[in-house]
Image: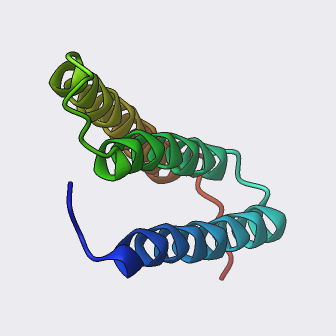
Amino acid sequence: MHLEAEVYGLVLAGFGVVALCTLLALVYLFWRSRHRAILWFGGQLFCLTGAFWFFFRALCSPYDPQFVMYSEEQSVNIACAGLFWALSMFCMLFGIYRLLRKGPVIHQF
């Protein structure tokens, strides 16, 4: 895809900053609570990073008229990004389920 030259670096840096902040927040939350359900959100971040990697490959791949499989390679990259995204949504939903699951009630009045 043809974009301005600065866009590719900004997209990569922006995702890196957001992913790093998310990772730090997850580590902090896990350290404070020791709740194992937070590990599923780490899996979500891992899968989202994979989805971003495949999407960024599709975004940055220059068009080469000599390469006859260009559109197929782009389609596979987009499909892999979609599969990783779907897996990340599964991890997020399962993490939410584990966090909200009813446990023994301890009344502290």
Nearest the eye: 47 or 62: 62
Q: Quadrant of the C terminus?
A: bottom right
Q: Quadrant of the N terminus?
A: bottom left
Question: Residue extending furthest right?
Answer: 31
Picture coordinates of residue 97, whole percent (x, y)? 42, 43
Whether residue 21 sits left or right of residue 80 in the image: it is right
Whether residue 4 sits left or right of residue 30 in the image: it is left
Question: Residue extending furthest front?
Answer: 66
Q: Quadrant of residue 20?
A: bottom right
Picture coordinates of residue 67, whole percent (x, y)? 27, 22
Mark count: 0
Inspect this view and state whether residue 102 appears: no
Query: Which residue is pictured at 39% across the width and 33% down the height?
Result: 84
Picture coordinates of residue 94, whole percent (x, y)? 43, 38
Query: Which residue is pictured at 27% across the width and 77% down the height?
Result: 4
**Location of residue 23 with respect to 4 vertically, above or below:** above
Color scheme of the displayed model: rainbow
Whether residue 69 sits left or right of residue 102 in the image: it is left
Nearest the eye: 65 or 5: 65
Query: Which residue is pictured at 40% across the width and 39% down the height?
Result: 54
Nearest the eye: 89 or 71: 71
**Location of residue 30 with respect to 92 vertically, above or below:** below
Q: Quadrant of residue 29?
A: bottom right
Nearest the eye: 86 or 37: 86
Inspect this view and state whether residue 74 appears: yes
Picture coordinates of residue 51, whole percent (x, y)? 40, 42
**Location of residue 12 with respect to 41 vertically, above or below:** below
**Location of residue 33 with respect to 13 vertically, above or below:** above
Q: Quadrant of residue 106?
A: bottom right
Query: Which residue is pictured at 57% across the width and 66% down the height?
Result: 19
Whether residue 62 sits left or right of residue 14 in the image: it is left
